[in-house]
Amino acid sequence: MTILQRMARFALVASSAFLCVQAQDFKVASGHEIMIVAHPLAAKAGLLVHEQGGNVVDVAVAAAYALGVVEPHGSGIGGEGMMLIYNATTGASTIIDFKAIAPEAASYEKLDFKNVASWSKTAKGASVPGAVAGLELAREQFGTLEGKVVLQPAVDLALNGFEVDSTLAARLKASQPTLGKDAYSARTFYPGGASPKPGAVLTNRDYGVSLKEIQANGARAFYTGSIADRIVKDAEKHGGFITREDLRAYRAIIREPLRGSYRGTEIITTPPPCGGMHLLEALNILSHFDLKAARASDNYHLHLLAETFKLVFKDERTHNADPEFKSVPVSQLTSEEFAFRRFLDIDLASARHGAKVNPGALEPKHTTHLSVMDARGNAVSLTITLSSLFGTAHTVEGGGFLLNNEMQNYDADPSAANALQPHKRVVTSLVPTILARGGKPVAVMGLPGGDAIISTMTQVIVNLLDFEMDLETAIASPRVFTIFSQRTLEIERPVSEKTKILLRSLGHDLDEWEKNAYFGVVQAVERKETSGLLVGVSDERRSGAAIGK
């Protein structure tokens, strides 16, 4: 038994207080029974539920609720997201769409989309949250345990406290000028007026009470019960748009995932309004190149990746939308014929230039992701988000949780596919993904990263399938990012002088970055096809852990 496995077993026999004080990262782990990759305390919460008989959905839901407590900068019951579930017995894959919806009262007349910054960090920036509806739908239809058991680790973390890690400490310190402006938020996140340092114990008793209400009454507590009352009262007090009618109208949706193929491996991912069809589009375009040979030529493949991303992100802006409001040409955009036309659009000798955009000007969104797989190949890939760092930076008074600020992600153009409409789901890049061969999953993965999610997921898959890297190397390798409106190619170090000379000769303006979460933070589990061994890898770019047994 490994040290990690012994620690995990100790976590199960010790009291729940163990969760409150341990926050060490184990970036790579292996096991034969189950593997969970997430924030270390969320992963341990999932493992506790597994030991009580929970299946992978119960484990994922428990970890997701815990994430809302320990990663409040990117997650929580005031957020939204998507979950991909794989059933190894039936071979069926299911999407739980719990994307937020726009409040009925929100409109272009009431929101200045030419100056989004003036309202995105206020109550006006909040969409109707979907997290509780989605997590409870998943647990009730695909889990095995009662909510009281599944939510208990998160309740304990909120009520008893948890150890602040370096990531949360840095986020809280950077956000104190905005998050600390509100007296209730200041009491919640800055006890004593100071920003918590790494190792400090932070409690959130109001959040714990909210979670206990969900334990007792399920999603009703959030959408029609006492939590709904707090949300509406808070919106009325601070100028938000969310009403009781908006909350009552919310529904999580069960959808079919999208399926594609790359280098003989099946890719299972998210449908609109998320980014899966553009992940498949990117891979279809890249299938026309010998990327392995291009990489051997001073990393020429980076030019091909960059030019592919520019085309794909333009298609995302043009076509992706809430399918309940607009017909989305999924079959066309994911077809081989469409990819071939896009392939022909790529200039092999020159970079396509958009407008000059300051490097890093596109704000990295703050999101969380977890991946789970068991010995039989049952798997969950779940991404949950508040959009910006700490969402609206406004905590619902008495509830202890922050609301998302997804309203900023609607298109400024009222005629666009992703235009704001009442109760419409907003387009985002979320791509929880499963790779499968022979009808069996070989990897489950996903990441936060805002605009970089699609491009980073593409690069990790290319690393695995074209360059035959192991999972840890595929995730750790330097990445690039650019979009259609951006002249600059952002690139992580280390990058060789030969590669820089080549890319500049092709017309790329380079902006070099040290490795960081701007390029996404991949959480993944691989299942070895011969031995069945589960290998979990948590990206070094942010706090996270792989925990299994």
Image: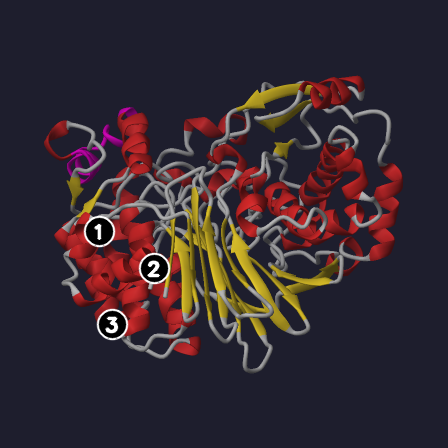
Q: Is residue 310 above or below residue 1?
A: above
Label 1 neighbour load within 10 Å: few <14, some 14-19, many 20+: many
User: Type of residue at label 3?
Assistant: Val
Rendered location of residue 374, percent (x, y): 45, 70
Question: Residue 182 in magenta?
Answer: yes
User: Type of residue at label 1?
Assistant: Gly
Q: CA distance from mark 3 to mark 2?
A: 28 Å
Q: CA distance from mark 3 to mark 1?
A: 21 Å
Mark sitting earlier along the chain (2/1):
2
Mark sitting earlier along the chain (3/2):
2
**Quarter of the rendering occupied by the N terminus:** bottom left
Label 2 neighbour load within 10 Å: few <14, some 14-19, many 20+: few
Q: Main secondary structure of the magenta part?
A: helix
Report the mark closest to the observer, 2 or 1.
2
Report the mark closest to the observer, 3 or 2.
2
Identify residue for label 2. Answer: 2
User: Type of residue at label 2?
Assistant: Thr
Mark sitting earlier along the chain (3/1):
3
Task: State the extent of the magenta-drawn residues as a range.
Answer: 177-190
Q: Nearer the viewer, residue 509 or 124?
A: 509
Residue 69 lies left or right of residue 518; in this view the side is left
Rendered location of residue 254, percent (x, y): 53, 70
Give the secondary structure at mark 1. Answer: loop
Rendered location of residue 117, percent (x, y): 45, 27
Residue 39 lies left or right of residue 206; in this view the side is right
Give the secondary structure at mark 2. Answer: loop
Q: Is residue 107 above or below residue 359?
A: below
